[in-house]
Amino acid sequence: MSASHALHDDAALLRPPPTLQVHLRINGQAHTLEVETWTSLLDLLRERLLLTGTKKGCDHGQCGACTVLVDGRRINSCLTLAVMQDGADIVTVEGLADGERLHPLQQAFIDHDAFQCGYCTPGQLCSAQGLINEGQAHDRDQVRELMSGNICRCGAYPQITDAVLSVLRQDAGSPAGQDDDDRNGPRHWTPGTVPA
């Protein structure tokens, strides 16, 4: 290898990585950022913008801990590149509350004791808001099925389902504590079990 070839290779190693400019609206605030093309939306949120509410769980799209809302739809932020979301409106768990006033889902999670360690809670909350935006869940079984991409290792699924149902009922104007599953009496679950 010639000396000029070696210098050329060294110069290539010293060059900064290629970046693209992205324009994002995150939690209501506009951002223009230079981003390496391989940066996931999750890493951009956590490492560049210090929005650490969004969690890195499996980093393979299997646990839902990184769920955020992009243009109102829930996505696993570990599975999308930040540059793919240019122009998007993104909401993380930090953007759900209105100042000091909790979002109804956040309050419902507290009221229904829908978390234990709390690691999955940000993803569960964003996924639940996405589920409500989709308008496809109307009963307990549908909530369970449509939230099944969000794993809770502590097993707080019954309380999470109750919390989401309580907000769905509020939005639909149903009396608190009543849904289609409650017509024949309340459904009971055994603590320590995970409903299917």
Image (tube, rainbow, N blue to C red):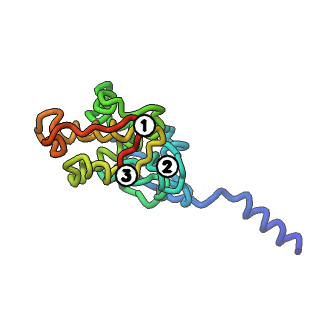
Q: Which residue is mark 1?
A: 192
Number of other residues with Cα within 10 Å of mark 3, as a class: few under 14, some 14 to 19, many 20 or more: some
Seen as rendered, the residue at the extreme bottom is: 1
Query: Looking at the rendered structure, which numbered label has been put on residue 42?
Result: 2
In the shown orientation, is residue 38 left or right of residue 99? Answer: right
The residue lying at 11 percent from left, 38 percent from top is: 174
Pick the residue in front: 164 or 83.
164
Return the x and y of residue 76 as percentages of the image width and height: 43, 53
Residue that carries the numbered disc 3 in the rendered image: 148
Residue 48 percent across, percent down from the top left = 53, 43
- Badge 1 or badge 2: first in the primary sequence: 2
Q: Is residue 11 visible?
A: yes
Give amino acid for label 1: Gly
Q: Residues within 10 Å of mark 2 (few under 14, many from 20)?
A: many
Q: CA distance from mark 3 to mark 1?
A: 18 Å
Residue drawn 51% across and 59% down? 20
Left or right of 70, for residue 36: right
Furthest residue in direction right, as rendered: 2
90 above or below 11?
above
Question: What amino acid is labelled 2 in the image?
Answer: Leu
Mark 1 lies on a secondary structure that is loop
Is mark 1 in CB contact (under 8 Å) with mark 2? no
Percent coordinates x, y for residue 175 in the rendering: 11, 34
Q: For the view shown, which residue lies furthest in the top direction?
A: 100
Query: Which of the two marks, 2 or 3, is nearer to us in this view?
Result: 3
In the rendered image, which quarter contains the N terminus? bottom right
Count the marks. Answer: 3
> Element under label 2?
helix
Q: Earlier in the sequence, mark 3 or mark 1?
A: 3
